[in-house]
């Protein structure tokens, strides 16, 4: 049962989640719709249940096993030698005790455009070393916009320039895992020693520790010790420090005292640039394949702002084309990627957009649609119009009608206004990105 589910989970959850959380599970039985697993500790059981429970259930059912519920148990005769594998990936190289760095994530392979140029420049600056310039460097932005890529790029560059530097990169999740393991195994001294001996500490996806009190506490101390010792810290998160819920105030303010830069959602130009650079790599790999004019432009238009999704689509396209031995035409692209294309224009209605936007800005739906002209209402209204234009196939007059019978020129003006604001007000682009994500779920 389990073996086949395992391989799909590996694909679905990614390598590091898989080896940290799924591998330690031992399938025990499936009875009366309850799938039981043995786990080395309750912590792992709870974590897996909360974070991957749905996925596991889904995969079990998909492979034909009727499971309604999962149960995680620490076996009573808990072998003391529990095969808790070293769950944090440790690279073999002697100086590196953090997570593995992806060798493809370098500055060379990072395509720079308007939405990410500031983050890129800041990352470059930090990587080039010299006097400690921004400490901490805090990078934030939505999923798949290049945070991890930039962090790895900094690490690669630092190691290249100063091999003697002790650079430690890990995710906040790994930080927590190590911390908990150290507590359990009474190895806090080693833990503190390790973190306090680094020259550069990078913690990815720090929002993960929000709400996890003791981990936050330890993170705060580690952070302070390093900053006091003039060590460089680089942090990433999915939103700005002030916006991370359940993160202690003192940590927020600490995180803000260096340089905070954001990666904006990609725009068409950047997506096209990324596609072009990836195609060059594929061209070397599949020299026989021809890609028709207009295909990349089509993809850049139609696929969402998440670069990971964009890359995935391209990979699939090349694999498919090489399999069938055909030129990559627009038609083949539509065939091969129909599900991705469909997902990226999941039907969102103007009404849903209006509801979400009014909730987000805490105004009444009737005020959004009604005639009030105060900025408090007008701005959210324009944002909703913009999203309606972008995310639905409604025409301007149709959108206008749904906004209390406004004229199409009013809608057009609203859309333009938001486009202008996006260029200079990062709060607006962040709001839009959040809303867009919420709507697509
Ligand atoms: P995040 O950590 O922000 O979720 P990642 O750094 O993991 O995103 O990026 C997702 C994928 O997109 C990676 O494969 C990365 O190489 C690629 N990517 C993101 N931004 C760029 C860019 N500007 N140029 C080239 N590749 C990019
Ligand atoms: Mg990341």
Image: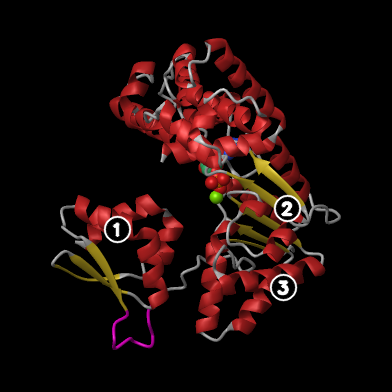
Near-viewer residue (31 or 203) = 31
Does any portion of residue 142 appear in the rendered image? Answer: yes
For marks 2 and 1, the one nearer the N-term is 1
Image coords of residue 69 (percent x, y): 24, 63
Q: Mark 2 points at which residue?
A: 137
Ligand 1 is located in which of the four quadrants?
Answer: top right
* Residue range highlighted in magenta: 74-84
Crowding at mark 3 (Cα within 10 Å: few <14, some 14-19, many 20+):
some
Give the numbered dot on residue 197: 3
Q: Name the residue under label 1.
A: 56
Near-viewer residue (324 or 192) = 192
Mark 2 vs mark 3, CA separation in Å: 19 Å
Q: Classify mark 1: helix, strand or loop.
A: helix
Whether the residue under disc 1 has CB within 8 Å of ligand 2:
no
Residue 245 falls left or right of residue 198: left
Q: Classify mark 3: helix, strand or loop.
A: loop
Give the numbered dot on residue 155: none
Residue 157 falls left or right of residue 436: right
At a point 44% along the width and 19% down the height, the residue shown is 291
For marks 2 and 3, the one nearer the N-term is 2
Mark 2 vs mark 1, CA separation in Å: 36 Å
Does any portion of residue 163 appear in the rendered image? Answer: no
């Amino acid at each position: 049962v389990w073996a086949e589910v395992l391989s799909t989970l590996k694909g679905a959850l990614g390598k590091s989640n898989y080896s940290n959380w799924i591998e330690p599970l031992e399938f025990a039985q499936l009875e009366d719709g309850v799938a039981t697993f043995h786990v080395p500790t309750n912590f792992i059981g709870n974590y897996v249940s909360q974070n991957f429970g749905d996925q596991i259930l889904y995969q079990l059912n998909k492979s034909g096993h009727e499971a309604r519920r999962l149960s995680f148990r620490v076996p009573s005769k808990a072998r003391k030698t529990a095969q808790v594998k070293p769950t944090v990936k440790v690279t073999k190289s002697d100086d590196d005790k953090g997570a593995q760095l992806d060798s493809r994530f370098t500055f060379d392979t990072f395509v720079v455009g308007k939405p990410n140029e500031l983050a890129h420049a800041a990352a470059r600056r930090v990587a080039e070393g010299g006097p400690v310039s921004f400490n901490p460097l805090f990078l934030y932005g939505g999923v798949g916009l290049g945070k991890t890529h930039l962090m790895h790029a900094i690490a690669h560059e630092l190691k290249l320039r100063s091999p003697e530097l002790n650079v430690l990169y890990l995710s906040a999740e790994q930080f927590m895992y190590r911390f908990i393991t150290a507590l359990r195994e009474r190895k806090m001294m080693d833990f503190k020693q390790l973190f306090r001996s680094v020259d550069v500490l990078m913690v990815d996806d720090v929002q993960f520790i929000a709400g996890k009190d003791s981990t936050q506490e330890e993170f705060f101390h580690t952070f302070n010790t390093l900053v006091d010792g003039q060590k460089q810290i680089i942090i990433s998160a999915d939103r700005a420090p002030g916006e991370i819920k359940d993160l202690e105030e003192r940590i927020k303010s600490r995180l803000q005292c260096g340089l905070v830069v954001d990666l904006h959602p990609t725009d068409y130009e950047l997506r096209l640039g990324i596609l072009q650079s990836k195609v060059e790599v594929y061209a070397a790999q599949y020299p026989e394949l021809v890609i028709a004019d207009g295909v990349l432009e089509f993809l850049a238009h139609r696929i969402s702002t998440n670069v990971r999704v964009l890359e995935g689509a391209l990979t699939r396209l090349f694999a498919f084309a090489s399999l069938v031995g055909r030129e990559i035409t627009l038609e083949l692209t539509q065939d091969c990627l129909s599900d991705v294309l469909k997902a990226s224009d999941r039907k969102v209605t103007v009404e849903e957009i209006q509801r979400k936007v009014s909730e987000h800005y805490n105004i009444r739906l009737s005020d959004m649609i009604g005639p009030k002209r105060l900025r408090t209402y007008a701005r959210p209204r324009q944002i909703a119009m913009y999203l309606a234009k972008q995310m639905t196939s409604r025409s301007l007059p149709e959108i206008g009608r749904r906004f209390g019978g406004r004229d199409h020129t009013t809608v057009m003006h609203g859309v333009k206004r938001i486009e202008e604001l996006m260029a200079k007000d990062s709060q607006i682009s962040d709001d839009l990105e959040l809303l867009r994500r919420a709507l697509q779920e």
